[in-house]
Amino acid sequence: MTAAPRLADVVVIGAGQAGLAAGYYLRRAGADFVILDAQDAAGGAWRHAWPSLRLFSPAQYSSLPGRMMPIPADGGYPGAADVVAYLTDYEQRYRLPIVRPAAVRAVRRAGERLAVESGAGTWRARYVVSATGTWWRPYVPHYPGMREFGGEQLHTAGYRGPEPFRGKRVVVVGGGNSAAQILAELSQVARTTWVTVRPPRLLPDEVDGRALFDLATRRRQAVLAGQEAASIGDLGDIVAVAPVRQARDRGALKAEPMFSALTPGGVVWADGSTAVCDVIVWCTGFRPALGHLAPLRLRGPSGVIPTDGTRALAEPRLHLLGYGDWTGPASATLIGAGRTARQLVAEIAAQL
């Protein structure tokens, strides 16, 4: 016998950093809400990151509302394990009503409410906050010969550390922070080649996530005011955290242009030059994990759901949080998710 749907004012989908930030403000607003999380433990996507991953902002600039992230013992930027411990403490400290594992399969319209169907049952909500992030949709571009390549291919999401690649020939693809950090440690145990679509640009050593967040905020405000705005990309692409600076100083961050195809034994460039390799690591980013929203048919021509702030234009009962600048300035970061969540919850609370 199927259980009757449960009712809530708000259902938050996902208990990563964005979902917890929303939960914090919903708790303060006195809302009747629940957070559904597909994972079997706290920590969100950070539980699945490679151990040496470092944030590119200090702890005091990488915190959710109400609770400062502890400064790591080494005084440096927090690592993935530090973030998992912090998020675990955070949800316990604020006694957030999290149901897990509760993977959400679909969100559908159900009269005056939205029906949220999950592995732990169905909820009917006046408002839904989707905060599933991007980690679960790794993106790998298509290049000729990918199926014929005889070595190993993996994405950032599947990388767990350098030891399996010791002594191998590894090509790292991508010009962002993940590529630079992974290359920095792989270059110490493997023969590495770095390839990027455009020449990689390291930010000045004194520039970190604090400056990037401030720039993203100013850019958002300028766009809303119809003014010209500087792009974050104008500063550079890669934050020079300590391992990246060390790799730069030993000459390991020399990038080649993007290859044009894969061969059974490696890669080939447009001019016919080749490189033999055993492994290709695709540090090529992620896409928003929005499959659960497919029944609502909200995607625009570009594949992104059109929004006004965080609210879906075609379904005002749905808010999206933590997917990038299109759902709030730097909202895919810890501090950005918190600041965007405050505005989102204030909007919902005014309607409840």
Image (cartoon, rainbow, N blue to C red):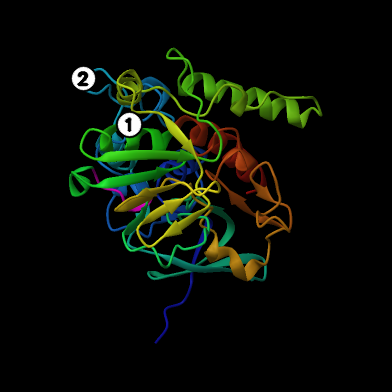
Residue in the foreground of this view, choosing between 61 and 158: 158
158 in relation to 344, above or below: below
Residue in the foreground of this view, choosing between 230 and 63: 230
Is the magenta region chiefly helix, strand or loop? loop
Name the spot of residue 276 as percent of width and height, x first.
Answer: 34, 50
Q: Earlier in the sequence, mark 1 or mark 2?
A: 1
* Magenta region includes residue 31: no
Q: Residues within 10 Å of mark 2 (few under 14, many from 20)?
A: few
Name the spot of residue 146 as percent of width and height, x first.
Answer: 44, 62
96 in relation to 298, above or below: above
Q: Amino acid at mark 1?
A: Arg
**What residue do we see at 39% from left, 87% from top?**
1
Residue holding disc 1: 54
Q: Which label was assigned to residue 74?
A: 2
**What residue do we see at 46% from left, 46% from top?**
273
Task: Mark 1 and mark 2 in contact? Answer it, CB < 8 Å.
Answer: no
Q: Which residues are magenta?
A: 157-161
129 in relation to 233, above or below: below
Q: Amino acid at mark 2?
A: Asp
Name the spot of residue 185 as percent of width and height, x first.
Answer: 27, 34
